[in-house]
Image (cartoon, helix red, strand yellow):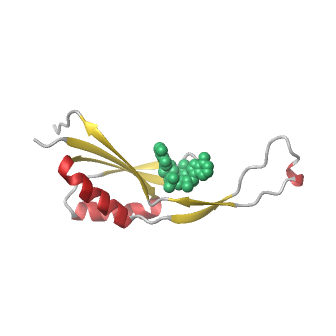
Amino acid sequence: MAGIKLVLAIVQAKDAGRVIDALTEDGLNATILASTGGFLREGNSTILMGIEDTQVDGVLRTIQRSCHRREQFVSPMPPAVEPVDSYVTYPVKVEVGGAIVFVMNVDRMERF
Ligand code: 2BA
């Protein structure tokens, strides 16, 4: 039997529906969890998939095709020591997504 991998992909909420549609069209099982980015503190989606070794490249291509990089502006918080009205913050541009993907070895997978 081929080795099993766990794919954990963090994608922007806007892309999650498209990713899941594409994966299920390919006949693959996936679980989607609501998650929050530690930096932006905005909602994103974490997709979990248990798949065979041989399916990993195809899954990564599907995820890549379905996710887009986007620019987002973040307003840094003023430092606590400064009087708030004497401190001007400028939004900082960050690029988010397409997808952050981890592929892990799985010792065993059971379906009861
Ligand atoms: P967030 O943590 O909300 O990060 C959103 C975007 O902000 C990141 O996009 C990156 O461009 C920027 N960013 C993050 N930390 C930063 C920092 N300390 N200084 C400046 N800019 C920073 P992505 O890299 O595409 O990450 C998208 C989301 O994927 C992240 O949302 C986080 O939820 C997750 N993620 C990224 N790398 C990860 C990792 N190594 N482990 C676990 N989760 C990760």
Q: In which quadrant of the rendered image does the N terminus lie?
A: top left
Q: Is residue 108 left or right of residue 12?
A: left
In this view, the residue in front, 31 or 98, is 98
Seen at 22% across and 33% down, the residue is 107
The vertical placement of 86 against 67, above or below, is: above
In this view, the residue in front, 14 or 94, is 94
Seen at 41% across and 64% down, the residue is 67
In x, y percent, where is residue 99? 42, 56
Q: Is residue 71 left or right of residue 15?
A: right
Q: Is residue 41 visible?
A: no
Q: Is residue 48 visible?
A: yes
Seen at 30% across and 62% down, the residue is 62
In x, y percent, where is residue 45? 43, 53
Seen at 36% across and 62% down, the residue is 64
Residue that protrudes farthest toward the left in the picture: 1
What is the tally of numbered marks visible in this picture? 0
In x, y percent, where is residue 81? 84, 40
Q: In which quadrant of the rendered image does the C terminus lie?
A: top left
In x, y percent, where is residue 35? 47, 48
